[in-house]
Image (tube, helix red, strand yellow):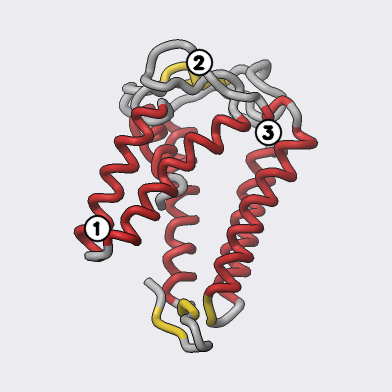
Amino acid sequence: MAAQLVDWGFFTLALFGIEAMRVDPGASAMVPFDLYHMPFTHSLLGTAIWAGAFLGVVAIRQRDVRLAVLAGLVVLSHWLLDFLVHVPDLTLDGTPPKLGLGLWNMPWIAMPLELGLTGGALAFYLRRTRGPAGPPLVLAGVMLLFQLVNWFAPHPASAGPFLYIQALVAFGVLTALAAWVGENRWFRKRGGLAMQGR
């Protein structure tokens, strides 16, 4: 949830006309979306506010400040990782200049990078937890399927509510699967013992 939180926010705000995008096949080699108005979710300031809010929710719900800080940092990392791949459409505070290194124009770099980061994070999680292999394999398979669809399936002719709802449903499926994985694995502790994951 933390890693995708600002995208949840963007597509929800776009559904209500608060943020906006349009389909433009020339926007980048990999992603034909012109993300021209997203000051509340994809500015560094906006992302930091989302991160702070999520940190607060986790701290109150889990009563664990360290966990809450980590969750907030995951939210904040979204902007930093987007900065690598987005063409210049990110901002610091919602106003120009627009920023982004544009690796979406270099698929031979962006694709291995995105797969490597996701696969590395999953491998790290599996090393730190114990439990059945099935749930994380299902999650990894669905994530890979969604990524392949995102990269190679025909893109919509225009942006609109159907596209935004489709994205939110995909995020919902992945969030539900991630929660299912968390319910079926246990964190390793020093000495080889394990504790129930949440």
Is label 3 in contact with label 2 (beta carbons under 8 Å)?
no
Q: Nearer the viewer, mark 3 or mark 2?
A: 2
- Label 2's element? loop
Q: CA distance from mark 3 to mark 2?
A: 28 Å
Local packing at callout 3 (Cα closer than 10 Å; few below 14, some 14-19, many 20+) is: few
Does residue 15 show up?
Answer: no
The disc, 1 or 3, on the residue closer to the chain's N-terminal end is 1
- Up-down relation of residue 104 to residue 76 (above or below): above
Label 1, on which residue? 59
Q: Is residue 121 left or right of residue 97?
A: right
Label 3, on which residue? 154
Label 2, on which residue? 98
- Up-down relation of residue 42 to residue 65 (above or below): above
Which amino acid type is shown beneath numbered disc 2? Lys
x and y, in percent, of residue 101 in the image: 63, 24
Question: What is the residue that sits farthest to the right in this orientation?
Answer: 108
Quarter of the image with the C terminus is bottom left
At 59% across and 65% down in the image, what residue appears? 124
Q: In front here: 152 or 120?
A: 120
- Label 3's element? loop
Q: CA distance from mark 1 to mark 2?
A: 33 Å
The disc, 3 or 2, on the residue closer to the chain's N-terminal end is 2
- Up-down relation of residue 45 to residue 109 (above or below): above
Q: Is residue 120 left or right of residue 41?
A: right
x and y, in percent, of residue 135 in the image: 55, 73
Instruction: Examine the image and state in which quarter residue 132 appears.
Output: bottom right
- As drawn, the label of residue 38 is none
Local packing at callout 1 (Cα closer than 10 Å; few below 14, some 14-19, many 20+) is: some
Which amino acid type is shown beneath numbered disc 3? Pro
